[in-house]
Image: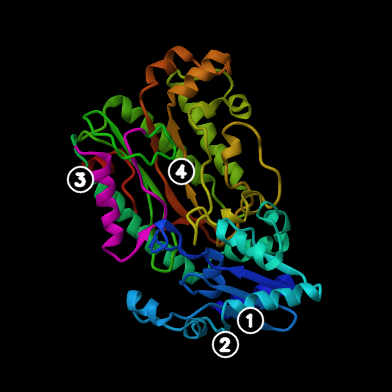
Amino acid sequence: MYVQRRKILCEKIGAGLILFFGNDESPMNYPDNTYHFRQHSSFLYYFGIDFPSLAAIIDVDNDRQIVFGDDFTIDDIVWRGSQPTISERASQSGITETQPLVKLFTILKEAQASRKVIHFLPPYRPENKIKLLRYLNIRPDEVNLNSSSDLVRAVISQREIKSAEEIAEIEKAVDLSVDMHVMAMKIARPGMTEAQIAAKVHEVVLARNCNLSFPIIATVNGQTLHNHSHHNILKEGDLFLLDAGAETQMHYAGDLSSTFPVSRQFDERQKGIYQISLKAHEAAISTIAPGTNFREVHLAACLSITTSMKEIGLMKGDVAEAVAEGAHALFFPCGTGHMMGLDVHDMEDLGEVWVGYNGEPKSTQFGLKSLRLAKQLLPGHVFTIEPGIYFIPELIDLWKSEGRFNDFLVWKEIEKFRNFGGIRNEEDFLITETGCRILGKPKPKSISEVESFR
């Protein structure tokens, strides 16, 4: 599999030298106390070696592939135990040549001297920016300008189409993610803290020798889109929003969101807004098809939300015009979904404009500018569907004071919901040759399904 991936990459690039950096250990507060190690996803995709402080070169012109790294010394072994050699690790992905890291400098300097094109991806880790300064004399503030757009597009074109093996691994992640959400629905009670819920959700993946695909969002303040604070105490009448996903041992991600009542049942007002959110969710799903631009999927959710908000008196005027102007973004200020795979937001380190927009410019309109995916859907694409309804007091106050969208927003009625919070459901989908399908086992989503676990 890895040999074939590298072969395809060489065919796409055509000539030159391709340089990959793996990730290093990252200290929390002193060198020996590190954060959880996570390998660079593109390094994993092409070389499959889940070990820190590695680099690799693919010499397209000379059909030569080398992994660079240093084997453990006896001091390392004393503290960390025996480990496979770099050569043994590399052989598992079909690499027959390995060299110590010190040799990388010489090879790169020789390539520069012979004016060979050196392709590399834009780095997101500061240590890899420093390596490019050392090896190629490229300043850290100029590395993105010197990274290879040809390599970026080639990597995206491969990684965005998921193989059967990858889809199976993502489904493992989604299944485990469903278990995380069911756990929260079962245990949450008034008087518990958000941190207690997050801890039990995290335990689900740790017990399976897996990990989180991103930090857990577990909050009674669902109106804050990425709320990683866990200090609040749950109370009767609260809504609880959980956004959490598992990452498998092969580092493929799941990403799900659920909203449920802290009480045993939703109250009538919560049911009404929850149904609006769920209706938008289903409207987006009904639009998914091969060849459809994901922007249309997003707009289907926006139109559904605006229609429903007009029906309950929070909006007025022409629905299509309100969406075109962006008035609905008061309640839905983000995008409907993003690509998913080895990264929970797949390949966004390569640039959202390439991953989600094929190089086309993004909108600057509030709300629409946060849409991460707006290109034609192809068989093999994996992505999330996650429209939501959010009542953000600060945003309400700002737009109301500015008189923004007075032709579409009914401020008197909106004020009644200013402390409502936020609601989001999220599921993961695969585009097939003939349509789409949800990945993994079903997550409780309808009001009756959610309440059955409360």
Indicate the amino acid at tag 2.
Answer: Thr
Choose mark 1 or mark 3, whichever is in front. Answer: 1
Choose mark 4 or mark 1, whichever is in front. Answer: 1
| Left or right relative to 42: residue 15 | right
Q: Which residues are magenta?
A: 192-221
Choose mark 2 or mark 3, whichever is in front. Answer: 2
| Left or right relative to 377: residue 389 | left
Residue linked to disc 4: 386
Q: Earlier in the sequence, mark 1 or mark 2?
A: 1
Among the 4 quarters of the image, the one containing residue 223? top left
Among the 4 quarters of the image, the one containing residue 319? top right
Q: Earlier in the sequence, mark 4 or mark 3?
A: 3
Choose mark 4 or mark 3, whichever is in front. Answer: 3
Q: Using a 10 Å C-alpha cutoff, classify the residue at mark 3 as few (fewer than 14 neighbours), some (14 to 19) or many (20 or more).
A: some
Q: Position of residue 132 (x, y in %)?
A: 65, 63
Judging depth in this view, the residue of 383 and 250 nearest the camera is 250
Tag 1–tag 2 contact (CB < 8 Å): yes
Indicate the amino acid at tag 1.
Answer: Gln
Specify the quadrant that holds the N terminus: bottom right
| 194 is higher (above) or lower (below) than 149 | above
Q: Earlier in the sequence, mark 2 or mark 4?
A: 2
Q: Using a 10 Å C-alpha cutoff, classify the residue at mark 1 as few (fewer than 14 neighbours), some (14 to 19) or many (20 or more).
A: some
Describe the element under mark 3 as helix, strand or loop.
helix
Please state the total of marks drawn on the protein image: 4
Residue linked to disc 2: 96
The span from disc 1 to disc 3 (Cα, nearest Å) is: 51 Å
Residue linked to disc 3: 187
Residue linked to disc 1: 65
